[in-house]
């Protein structure tokens, strides 16, 4: 059935939009849930529609492909780290942030994201890498910068440590070791990353 | 034709073995060359045999699959960094080593290796990641350790810098930025990696 946007009454439109947002959320949730049970290769638009108790057309109307739908579902589902921890010292702040980043990596959507990248084809993988970069890496780097700047203001960190190489060390190490050494970054490893690498790197000159 | 190893004369065996090593080298070279022209998906055992001017059977006798053959060809073709540079200072040694590692990454076999990983399926990709780890990453980390230990002996590096977190920083950063930021690690970037990250990290306490 086709409904012209010109004939529908404004009140009806508003009501559809509300239903739309709720339905959209249900479809995104169903996509994540299905991804966890049947994997990327087993995932179909029909299966997602059924799990969300809607029709296939309602899914395709919003997302032209399962790739688009899954990218949105993962992006929406990933835990968002809102604020830089502010616990009074660079050590405690970086520790708390790394634990949050690690938890995001190993959350249900984070784990699903890695397994999708493992299963899908290379051009799709590139898109999902983009979801990781925009959804986890970039925000984390911004929060690391905030923590380091606060440390500089307190005299706890050397002033020239606010540079892109220093800011990239934590995400680079987390990606490298989880990929090449299958590290899951337990509490001890996170602590060693801060104590053996970040604190010596950040300490002011002469200390 | 089947030749029994018991009936062949020793002199004939020796001659066959020599021919074998030369032929093997020719097949490995042909595999790399074909990989550069037709890519992983276009690569066939027939095509490699033809390029090496031998029969398909001679190829299959040595490698049961193109995956095995390509893994060996890449492993054999990657530039091997033999010795840690010893130029008198940690800065010059690390700079020289990073340039060599970067050159290995962007050598013909290094570039072929990355494009194979991009094209092949995930279980094959895991194997080729292993080739990178064993062929480039592990040897580089060992050489970084050697440079750092020499720096500690000279009093140029703090003694507790010889730990796995510090040793992993260079490969982690090189992998991270080439993957997520498409960096090709030009001379300036390599220099900044050493000056903005490694030297502040390694300097002795009190300096």
Image: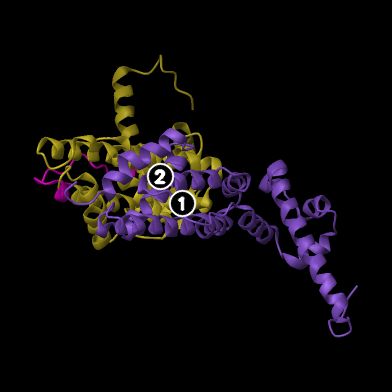
Chain colours: A yellow, B purple
Which residue is under mark 1?
B85
Residue at point 36%, 45% (across, down): B91
Does the magenta run of residues contain A83? yes
Subunit bearing disc 2: B
Circle 2 sits in a helix, a strand or a loop, which is it? Answer: helix
> Could you say where residue A199 lies in the image, as x and y percent from the top left?
20, 50
**Can residue B200 be seen in the rendering of this structure?**
yes
Camera-side residue of A39 and A125: A125
Give the residue at the far top of this rendering: A6
Residue at left offset 70%, top offset 61%: B65
Please count the marks in the image: 2
Determine contact: label 2, label 1, CB under 8 Å. Answer: yes
Q: Is residue B9 magenta?
A: no
Q: Are marks 2 and 1 on the same chain?
A: yes
For this rendering, which residue is in front, B115 or B54?
B54
Residue A35 position, x and y percent, is: 43, 52
Q: Which secondary structure class fits the magenta region best?
A: loop
The magenta span reads A75-93
Residue farthest along the bottom direction in this orientation = B6
Point out which mark residue B92 bears. Answer: 2
Position of residue B63 measured from the top left corner of the image (x, y, whole percent):
72, 64
Left or right of residue A30: residue A97: left
């Amino acid at each position: 059935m086709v409904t012209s946007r010109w004939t529908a009454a404004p009140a009806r439109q508003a009501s559809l939009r509300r239903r739309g947002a709720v339905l959209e959320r249900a479809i995104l949730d169903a996509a994540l849930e299905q991804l966890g049970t049947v994997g990327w290769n087993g995932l179909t638009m029909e299966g997602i529609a059924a799990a969300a108790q809607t029709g296939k057309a309602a899914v395709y109307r919003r997302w032209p492909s399962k790739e688009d739908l899954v990218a949105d579902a993962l992006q929406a589902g990933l835990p968002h780290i809102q604020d830089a921890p502010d616990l009074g010292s660079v050590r405690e702040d970086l520790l708390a942030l790394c634990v949050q980043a690690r938890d995001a990596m190993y959350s249900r959507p984070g784990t699903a994201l890695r397994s999708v990248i493992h299963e899908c084809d290379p051009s799709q993988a590139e898109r999902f890498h983009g979801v990781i970069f925009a959804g986890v890496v970039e925000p984390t780097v911004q929060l690391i910068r905030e923590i380091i700047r606060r440390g500089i203001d307190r005299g706890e960190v050397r002033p020239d440590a606010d540079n892109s190489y220093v800011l990239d060390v934590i995400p680079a190490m987390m990606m490298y070791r989880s990929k090449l050494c299958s590290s899951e970054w337990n509490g001890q490893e996170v602590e060693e990353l801060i104590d053996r690498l970040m604190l010596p790197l950040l300490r002011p000159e002469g200390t």
